[in-house]
Amino acid sequence: MKSFPKKFWRYIWRPPWWAVKCPLAWSQRLGLLLERVGADTIAEALFPHVEKKARRVTPLDASLPRTGSHRSKRWLIAVNTDVEVDD
């Protein structure tokens, strides 16, 4: 079986380029929403970046207070609004 070079593995295990270039709160929100719609593969690619960088809870809706809302421990999101997933 052919082994892959180290350069290949560095590329595979790094976060998507767009996750590095946008605010971390966007990546946190996107990861949560991707999981909600069943796009787990993309969410899994994004998670290491969020896990490494996120240190505080971000509200899902920045215009609403985050107190008293459900928390996503995985994405460090205060789910302070309802999200409907259309089929």
Image (cartoon, grey):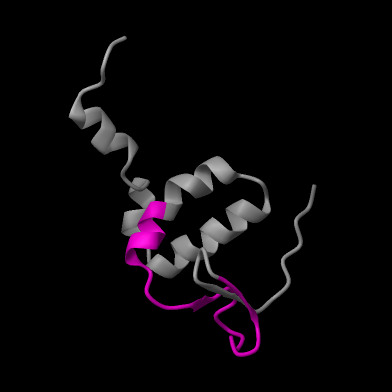
Would you place residue 43 above or below residue 51 in this image? above
Q: Nearer the viewer, residue 47 or 87?
A: 47
Q: Is residue 45 left or right of residue 20?
A: right
Quadrant hosting residue 24? bottom left
Q: Residue furthest top?
A: 1
Would you place residue 20 above or below residue 10 in this image? below
- The magenta span reads 48-72
Q: Is residue 26 left or right of residue 55?
A: right
Which residue occupies 60% across, 90% down?
67
Q: Residue furthest front?
A: 1
Would you place residue 50 above or below residue 7 in this image? below
Percent x, y of residue 59: 55, 78
Q: Residue furthest left?
A: 6
Which residue occupies 44% across, 54% down?
47
Percent x, y of residue 51: 39, 61
Percent x, y of residue 31: 52, 57
Q: Is residue 58 left or right of residue 81?
A: left
Q: Is residue 14 left or right of residue 85?
A: left
Percent x, y of residue 38: 66, 46
Which residue occupies 59% across, 52% down?
34
Quadrant hosting residue 62? bottom right
